[in-house]
Amino acid sequence: MTGVSGILLIDKPAGITSHDAVSHTRKAAGTRKVGHAGTLDPMATGLLVLGINSATRLLTYVVGLDKEYFATIRLGSATSTDDREGDETFRANPETVAAISIGDIARQINRLTGDIDQTPSSVSAIKVDGKRAYALARAGETVVLAARSVTVAEFELLGEPIPIDGHLDFLVRVSCSSGTYIRALARDIGLALGVGGHLTELRRTRIGPFRVTDAAVLENLDVAAELLHPATVAQQLFDAVTVDQTQALELSQGKRIELSAELATGAAILRPAPSIAAPDPHLGPYAAISPSGRLVGLLEIKGGRTRTLVNFPPDDATNQCGTEPVPELDSGVFVSADAPKPAPA
């Protein structure tokens, strides 16, 4: 299935890197043109969104989607990585930890819900002077990252905290904007309560409209059976417009097209997409769908004119997308076969 393009949802197991998952998929798909729309730490499990061949061009639009996680936060100690894999840097008095109430935890969760300024972990993949923060930290350098504005739309405490060996463990569900660090939420709750905090478990269950319940596992992976057609994915991400065969050919070649009255006024726009619905019918991006149901491009409509943002050349064998090489993107989408191994976010 070397020439087929599409999006693949993978449920990553614990203990492997996201790059390991990409490598496994490359072998299963018979192509090196496989990329991802955001990593998970080795200890974490859950949803990875992978692109194969030309469908990697869609990944840059997936990176910024909101995400959902389930996590176990442990109060009572802090670590160098803000998760269980780091070295312990602080241990609180067990009596102080035992005195923490569910109300204390709930108040900190409420404080960290909404639009907040969050300082990422020093072992994040954020670049500092061209180098990854985690690489600098592992080299012994002091890394101080600036706080970033993120949105924690939902931060829910699930059940009662459980005392374990002088610690308190509790499960949470977090729905948040891209760029939010769940380990930083754990760290900040522990800091505010004066006992330290870190993550012990993390599972990503959703990225935009994509859910881990629809994902495949790596063991005995059948890529052809699990692959999502680019047109299907594009219509989950964007509003769509239908184009005729001539327009489809022109768009797949990156050309502007003449607009019909229906298209120019927005009357040809199909159902609104749940994730990135355009506020103005003359902006976009819009997914351009051919009469045969193939994604031919992402376009912008403005002032009665179109501009092709991304084109998807046809592949006669698959009626999906071409397989041209795609460059590595600065947005964090890893799509180049020869690009360096990405770090977990």
Image: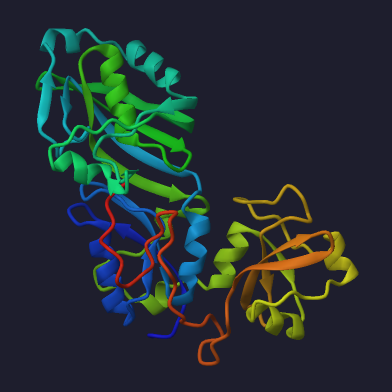
- Relative image position of residue 31 (x, y in whole percent): 34, 80
- Relative image position of residue 253 (x, y in whole percent): 64, 81
Q: Which of 167 and 62 is in front in this view?
A: 62
- Relative image position of residue 77 (x, y in whole percent): 15, 22
Q: Is residue 3 left or right of residue 295?
A: left
- Residue occupying the far bottom of the picture: 317
- How many discs mark residues in the rendered view? 0
Q: Which residue is drawn at 20% across and 15% down?
A: 195
Q: In this view, does 18 lie above or below 245?
A: above
Examine the rendering and report whether any part of residue 345 can be seen: yes
Q: Nearer the viewer, residue 245 or 70?
A: 245
Q: Which residue is drawn at 25% across and 35% down?
A: 122
Q: Residue at x 23, y 24 (%)?
A: 197
Q: In which quarter of the image is residue 286?
A: bottom right
Q: Nearer the viewer, residue 330 or 272?
A: 330
Q: Which residue is drawn at 21% across and 7% down?
A: 99
Q: Is residue 59 above or below residue 132?
A: below
Q: For the N terminus, which image quadrant? A: bottom left
- Residue occupying the far front of the picture: 129
Q: Is residue 24 left or right of residue 308?
A: left
Examine the rendering and report whether any part of residue 290 can be seen: no
Q: Is residue 247 above or below residue 103?
A: below
Q: In which quarter of the image is residue 105?
A: top left
Q: Is residue 101 left or right of residue 86?
A: right
Q: In this view, does 257 lie to the left or right of 156?
A: right
- Relative image position of residue 177 (x, y in whole percent): 48, 39
Q: In which quarter of the image is residue 241?
A: bottom right
